[in-house]
Image (cartoon, grey):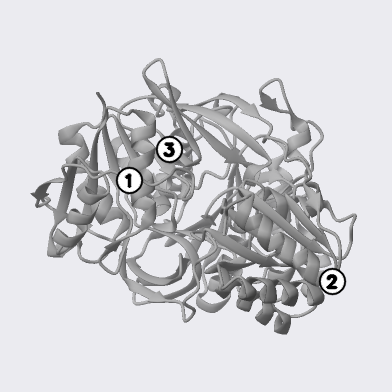
Amino acid sequence: MNIVVLIKQVPDTASNIQNRVSDGRVDLEGVTWVTNPYDEYAVEEALRLKEKLGGSVTLIALGPERVDSALKEMLALGADEAIHVWDPAFAGIGLQASAAVLAAAIARLETTPDMIWTGWKGVDADQGLLPIYLAEALGLPHLSFVVSVSVENGRVSVEREVEGGKERLEAPLPAVLSAQKGLNEVRYASLKGIMAVKRKQIPVWDAAALGLDLATLPATRVETLSVERPPERGSGRILGGTAAEAAAELVRLLHEEAKVI
Amino acid sequence: MSDIWVLAEARDGELKRVTYELIGAARALDAEAAVTVVLLGSGLAGMAEAAGAHGADRVLALDDPRLAAYSPDGWASALAEQARAATPDVILAPATFRGRDLAPRLAAKLGVGLASDVTELGRSDGAVTALRPIYAGKALARVRVAGKPAILTVRPNSFPAADTAGAGRLETVVPGELTALAVSSGIEAAASERPDVAEADIIVSGGRGMGGPEHFAMLEELADLLRAAVGASRAVVDAGWRPHGDQVGQTGKTVSPSLYIACGISGAVQHLAGMKTSKVIVAINKDSEAPIFGLADYGIVGDVFDVVPALIDALRARGGS
């Protein structure tokens, strides 16, 4: 089972992004970058599948210089190879163009992957589009929000959580799969793993290396006009008295004032 | 007058409420719009009628045994064929798991733009604009979707459901050639009758202050009185007290119910991001300094083990909800 995992970096989920919004944009200067949590589940699942079925795990990240550290961090967990896809011309391209770039990178690999894994969304822009755009660009089926997976006879079957239940899907391989929380518990890197990748040179593939004509990339269709702070919620009222008094007052207020029950 | 399509959300042969919210969203975007509800599946007559009763001017039913099982790529192909022929201005899909699985594949097939999980809609210079929470709601992005059709997935509970009937003129079409690679073998309903946190109008949520998984029984009791879902903080999910699907926050679900009751949740940044757009927030926590009180409309400083049972009694005294 040859597996490609796509990873990206996002600001640490503990970041106070709201305090970084001004003049219609988010200023990410100095923020702590971490591997997207959903991508970590994807890496973990790929490693488990490799341990069970053999094959290889290749990491690919599309992004500026800083993603090199994320690739190393994930390599240290036991992935075989990593490729950093970047070209200054890729800055600000839309998601359909990003999918086309990643599809070109995947096409250039020596072995055609059986599975391509990634997180179902980045916890930054929360779009959840890239895995599906990539599947369409590669002409492959996609299976989203996966919480369990099994492979048999060249087919993959997955389970995913949907509202109020679980859905099972099946598809022929190769396929694009996106990881949801609950898929697995991620491992930590061993000291040996960390040392092994320390001086590793991760190859960078730019537009020329990918044989990409930038003019043919899909145009950006969704433009961000501005970024705003969410409206402040003033603190409300603290209800005093005994637990019973406060509870009775709360029920009255929810019914008569807020009218939500 | 614009031509707006609404991709219906259905389960077990019935339309879900979010479908009616999308009809409402289409009318909010353009009061004069011709709203078409699009159904896919096999044996759709009953749902077509319901769509008309809730405001659809037209119902486009892709009614075919080959569409009986959900397939993201198969359904997207069938939809793309119709959308290419009819070129609607806007396609709205629910930001449910299914909508967020299907609509991007359709956008990719059509080579058009999609804005995910939007909570407001508008227009500017003929293009559709939308507000979408990013960083799980720590910031809001105003975006413009160029081209036609503009596709948007709309977060449940963001628009009031349409409440006037439409003509509901039914058009049934049979798709052309169809291939479906990824195919669903169905949805197994959760054992619980409680609504899912992503869909619920009221959520009762518990954090580490609940002390242990066994104490969620009282939150379930409170939730059942309110016909609410039971949510959880990341700490509680990571500790294995509650299933992952219940997690509210940046690495869980982002929710906007009309009432969110946070019990024993202190209010980590990543949790607050996921629930601060709730219409009314109630916080119950013994630490009066807990950040959750900073955005609660009503707060009770006290032990959840005293306050939650008192709340259950008070609701019972009122005769449930």
Label 3 to label 2, Cα distance in Å?
Answer: 54 Å
Specify the quadrant of the image occupied by residue B133: top right
Which residue was labeled with disc 1?
B163
Residue at 57% across, 45% down: A126
Q: Chain of mark 3?
A: A
Which residue was labeled with disc 2?
B303
* Image quadrant where one finds the C terminus of chain B: bottom right
Report the disc number at residue A231. Answer: none
Mark 2 residue type: Asp
Mark 3 residue type: Ala
Q: Position of residue B273 (x, y in %)?
A: 68, 48
When the figure is inspected, residue B41 is found, relative to residue B108, above or below; the finding is below
Note whether residue A200 is visible. no
Residue at 56% across, 56% down: A58
- Dot 3, how many residues are within 10 Å of its Cα: few (below 14), some (14-19), or many (20+)? many
Q: Position of residue B35 (x, y in %)?
A: 25, 37
Q: Position of residue A225 (x, y in %)?
A: 55, 22
Q: For numbered disc 1, what is the local secondary structure?
A: loop
When the figure is inspected, residue A59 is found, relative to residue A100, above or below; the finding is below
- Dot 2, how many residues are within 10 Å of its Cα: few (below 14), some (14-19), or many (20+)? some
Q: For numbered disc 3, what is the local secondary structure?
A: helix
Is the Cβ of the residue at disc 2 closer than 8 Å to that at disc 1? Answer: no
Residue at 17% across, 55% down: B49
When the figure is inspected, residue B188 is found, relative to residue A83, above or below; the finding is below
Residue at 85% across, 67% down: B302
Label 3 to label 1, Cα distance in Å?
Answer: 43 Å
Mark 1 residue type: Asp
